Image: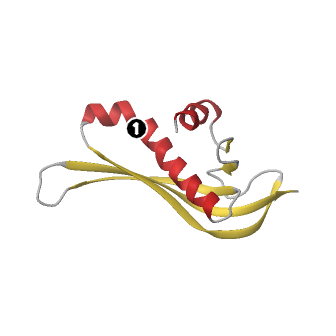
Amino acid sequence: MGRYAREKQTVGYPYASEEENIIVSTTHQLEGYAVERYIGVVSGDVVFSASFTRVEQNFARDRAMAVHSMVRKAREIGANAVIGLSFNCGSFHRQGTKKELCSISAYGTAVKIRTK
């Protein structure tokens, strides 16, 4: 996971992960590629205990972990790209406690692409 986070910070999107051999983009089209098949929606989630200091220090790492989880799921179902990447963040309380939890979700459309 560490390698993924380092590369993501320096490369940006669209992002090609050497570990997963998959392209991730916030757009719905990839220049130089054609979508052969739309496979389906994939997501990756990270849930963690909330404290302002912890959230501020680790947000980028947790977001990268959510993307990594999503990419792994996309690869498992035969995708070689994820388009339309988006994020959702939320917080909630664990039932029966006062402990606040936060979540980061990364989601997009898993696709099979080919070069034009």
Scheme of image coloration: secondary structure
- Up/down of 96 relative to 19, above or below: below
- Taking 99 as reference, is 19 left or right? right
- Across and down, in percent, residue 96 comes to 11, 59
Q: Which residue is label 1 attached to? A: 59
The residue sitting at 73% across, 63% down in the picture is 112
Q: Quadrant of the C terminus?
A: bottom right
Marker count (numbered): 1
Answer left or right for 13 relative to 30. left
The percent position of residue 51, horizontal first and vertical second, equals 24, 37
Residue type highlighted by circle 1 = Phe
Residue at image point 65% right, 50% down: 25
**SS state under label 1:** helix
- Residue at image point 83% right, 51% down: 32
Q: What residue is rendered at 30% in x and 49% in y?
A: 102
Quarter of the image for residue 9 reads top right
Horizontal and vertical percent position of residue 8: 59, 36
- Residue placed most toward the observer, 12 or 73: 73
- Residue 75: image quadrant is bottom right
Residue 31, position as x, y percentages in the image: 79, 50
Q: Is residue 72 left or right of residue 35?
A: left
